[in-house]
Image: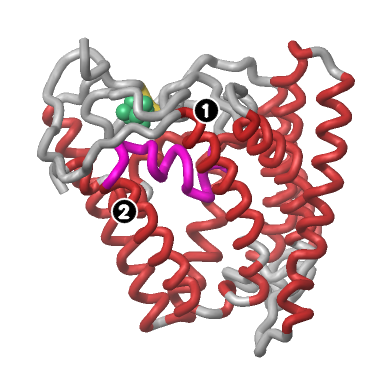
Amino acid sequence: MIAANTPFKSGNQLSARSVTIWRVVQFVVWLVGLAIFLSLIYFPSIGLLVFWNILIPIAPALFVVAAGLWRNVCPIAITNLLPRHFDLSLKMKISVRTQAKLQLVSILVLYAVVPLRHAIFNNDGMATAWLLFIAVTVGFSMGFVYDWKSGWCSTLCPVHPVEKLYGGNTLISMPNAHCGECVNCSVPCPDSTPNMHPAMATKTVYHKISGILTIGGLPGFIWGWFHVPDNNSTVSLSQFFGTYELPLLGCLVTLIIYLIWDKVLAEKDRPKLIAVFAAAGVSCYYWYRIPALLGFGKFAEDGVLINLKNILPEWSIILMIISTTIFFFSWFLLRKPNSKSWVVRPKFAWK
Ligand code: SF4
């Protein structure tokens, strides 16, 4: 897992010791990812619990506070970037227009796949393993052909729109533990651009549509998603399509609200509007997810990590979700944009 073209330089480059530490951390996290993947196949109840009820619930908060940490250690990203680390990638450049098209595909895939958690993935370890396998296969192939993160992490990965919406005012800039030198593969580079958000790139109509769909649609989509129960038996066709109704309806409602406010407000107020929608999205997520994890969810059996229904008083749950909501709204609306990027850009390859 040590990069064949590892930089051992000064400035923004990692020292040899830092590179070694990051490679060890990446290898350990990658092994954890592999263990989760195998447990989804061989011990599905454990795999499903760890993947959907531990790893995924941590992710949104991590994107808010330190998206760069996740970008450095995501096991799928590590796998997909192996061809580049070992100098096996064709290192092709993707045009800005094509990158924008891939980003639009990524948000559409997110909206298409996440509702299927209720119909299939939440209760089916093998199906979830297939989902991850497909993601890794597509990402690895893109990493084999295109340079650094341009083929997956910064374009096609369906988690990337969420990173961009929530990661707009990160706490810390991490070192870039992947790119040896910057070859400007992604424009704008989401990792290296301070206070990145989904509406930052406006060069093509695809940029604009994916930005609007992400910012406007995500809060309502999340609200709708939490109002659909999991299916524990064979899914009929109407149940299958039924899982889309509320998420897409919620998505449409908040999208319209966003578009109206975007028209009404002055250009200079747009960052605040995006911050409100980011805060609404992540707060809504934990508003429903925390009770569900602790056995207080709308649907008693769904998404439970540990059932504390008979131990914790109801008010403690209310306190938790009010606290997280206050925290996220304060995070996005009270903190000034701090001009920090998720990771520090390494020196350019041609300098
Ligand atoms: S830092 Fe440079 S090489 Fe790395 S992903 Fe960003 S643009 Fe690409």
Residue 323 location, x and y as percent? Answer: 72, 42
> Taking 174 as reference, is 222 above or below it?
below
Left or right: 45 in relation to 313: left
- Numbered label tally: 2
Q: Name the residue under label 2.
A: 140
**Is label 2 in a helix, a strand or a loop?**
helix
Residue type at the position of mark 1: Thr
Nearest the viewer among 1 and 257 is 257
Left or right: 207 in relation to 125: right
Q: Dot 1, crowdedness within 10 Å: few (<14), some or many (≥20)? A: many
Left or right: 139 in relation to 292: left
Residue 331 location, x and y as percent? Answer: 65, 29
Segment tinted magenta in the rendering: 145-163
Spatial separation of the CA atoms under disc 2 and disc 1 = 28 Å
Residue 67 location, x and y as percent? Answer: 47, 36
Tell me, yes or no, whether the highlighted magenta stretch contains residue 94.
Answer: no
Q: Residue at x 71, y 45 (%)?
A: 218
Nearest the viewer among 24 and 262 is 262
